[in-house]
């Protein structure tokens, strides 16, 4: 409570918080504006029977399940960022720009990601509209209505990208994560209402067990999100003129979950593509192409395949994102330049190899943890039969991670103003 009072006493920080809240209100208003020609009854049935698209709808703030003008959410921008980061491994010039180009290089790299968002939004928007029209969710549209709806949906995706970046600039947290968090929290009252409507006193022990497991999972997520390995670093004493510098000991923190929620968001964005592309070719006049597209669709809809692919992609992207954000070679060089060393390890190449070895072991724990959390809702729902609430999964990890990140950044800004 004292921290909250301090936030609203500091004018600059108060304005930042109010600005972020205003952006989230605009986001929620946009999520309630539907595209035209929607059959609402068929729309509800479609999302009730399709778990994958229900999960995707979480990341659009419920915009997809209501077919709003921001139905694509931040998916195109996230996918664009993934593709651009993957391209840094293929093109050295992009890697040079992203890692060593400084602020100007990163700004140019981000601009490319924004530009690539537009064609991806067009592709994903067309895929969604085509899929929903084949399911009877959308009423028949003329070519002009198709073009208009597609233009509005693409503009909605670009608009959310802009809102997310405005939020990030205020240093209250990552704009993308905060907007996804807002969408998840917005669905909580509906989930409570649905659970209360189907509550059965004969299954009271099941609900109690569900609540206990939920608390354990939340505690585990908080613990592993904050867990880190502290690597001791000593700095040698140096004499400059008549003064002595160094001779201190510190540590290098290496987090178990160094990638945060990004691997799960990346994995979900990639999982979306096979089904989207297959829907283009299901109605193809070429028999072979139509059959292959049908097989891909069946695989995507298969829950066992979906869970296995989801788990593997989360593990892979955890390693990938950690490799992008944590460079052992660069860190070892910086430690050596500052006259530091890890006790028992030679500076230079030996330090780099030691950090890489530790990073691989710690990341494995974090990757498996993220993978289990991602598929946990499917497992728990299979045992309890409770489908209105999900224990674990992307939603709870994002909620916990965003809250912790926002609290840290707000605390850092409050401390800065106090000093």
Image (cartoon, helix red, strand yellow):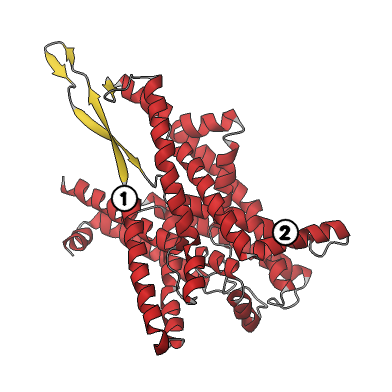
| Mark 2 crowd level (few <14, some 14–19, many ≥20, 10 Å Cα) | some
Q: Nearer the viewer, residue 244 or 362?
A: 362
Q: Is residue 352 left or right of residue 160?
A: left
Crowdedness of circle 1 by 10 Å Cα count: few (<14), some, many (20+)? some
Specify the quadrant that holds the N terminus: bottom left
Q: Position of residue 9 (x, y in %)?
A: 19, 60
Q: Identify the residue shown where x is 37% and y is 45%.
A: 256
Give the SS element for disc 2: helix
- Mark 2 and mark 1 lie on one chain; the one further toward the N terminus is 1
Q: Nearer the viewer, residue 227 or 32?
A: 227
Q: Secondary structure at mark 1?
A: helix
> Compared with residue 12, is residue 104 higher up or lower down, i.e. above or below?
above
Camera sees residue 59 = yes
Residue to which mark 1 is pinned: 226
The residue beneath circle 2 is: 296
Residue at horizontal 47 percent and vertical 50 percent from the top: 262
Residue 216: image tag: none
User: What residue do we see at 62% from left, 80% from top?
Assistant: 45
Viewer-proximal residue among 66 and 151: 66
Classify 264 as above or below 49.
Answer: above
**Position of residue 355 measured from the top left corner of the image (x, y, whole percent):** 38, 30
Tell me the quarter of the image containing the C terminus. top left
Cα separation, mark 2 vs mark 1, equals: 39 Å
Q: Which residue lies at the image location 39% right of the left edge and 62% below the top edge?
A: 399
| Residue 122 seen in the figure | no
* Residue at the outermost top position: 241
Q: Is residue 66 above or below residue 295?
A: below
């Amino acid at each position: 409570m004292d921290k909250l009072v301090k936030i609203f006493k500091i004018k600059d920080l108060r304005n930042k918080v109010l600005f972020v809240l205003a952006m989230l209100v605009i986001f929620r208003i946009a999520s309630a504006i539907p595209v035209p020609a929607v059959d609402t009854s068929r729309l509800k049935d479609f999302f009730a029977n399709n778990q994958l698209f229900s999960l995707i709808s979480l990341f659009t703030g419920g915009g997809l399940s209501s077919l709003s003008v921001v139905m694509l959410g931040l998916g195109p921008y996230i996918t664009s960022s993934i593709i651009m980061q993957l391209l840094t491994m293929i093109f050295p010039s992009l890697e040079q720009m992203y890692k060593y180009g400084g602020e100007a290089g990163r700004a140019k790299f981000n601009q490319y990601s924004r530009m690539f968002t537009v064609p991806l939004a067009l592709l994903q928007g067309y895929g969604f509209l085509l899929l929903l029209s084949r399911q009877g969710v959308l009423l028949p549209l003329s070519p002009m209505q198709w073009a208009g709806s597609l233009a509005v949906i693409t503009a909605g995706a670009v608009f959310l990208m802009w809102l997310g970046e405005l939020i990030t600039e205020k240093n209250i947290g990552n704009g993308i994560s905060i907007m996804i968090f807002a969408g998840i929290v917005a669905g909580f009252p509906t989930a409570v209402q649905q659970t209360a409507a189907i509550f059965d006193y004969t299954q009271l022990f099941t609900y109690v067990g569900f609540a206990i497991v939920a608390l354990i999972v939340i505690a585990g997520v908080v613990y592993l999100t904050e867990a880190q390995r502290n690597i001791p670093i000593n700095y040698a004493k140096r004499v400059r003129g008549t003064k002595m510098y160094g001779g201190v000991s510190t540590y290098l923190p290496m987090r178990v979950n160094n990638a945060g929620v990004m691997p799960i968001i990346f994995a979900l964005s990639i999982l979306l593509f096979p089904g989207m592309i297959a829907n283009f070719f299901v109605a193809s006049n070429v028999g072979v192409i139509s059959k292959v597209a049908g097989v891909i669709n069946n695989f995507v809809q298969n829950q066992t395949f979906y869970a296995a692919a989801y788990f593997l992609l989360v593990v892979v992207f955890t390693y990938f994102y950690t490799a992008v954000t944590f460079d052992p070679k660069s860190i070892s060089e910086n430690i050596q330049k500052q006259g530091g060393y890890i006790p028992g390890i030679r500076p230079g190449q030996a330090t780099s190899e030691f950090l890489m070895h530790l990073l691989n072991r710690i990341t494995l724990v974090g990757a498996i943890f993220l993978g289990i959390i991602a598929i946990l809702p499917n497992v728990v729902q299979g045992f309890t039969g409770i489908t209105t609430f999900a224990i674990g999964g992307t939603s709870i990890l994002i909620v916990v991670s965003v809250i912790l990140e926002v609290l840290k950044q707000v605390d850092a800004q409050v401390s800065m103003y106090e000093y």
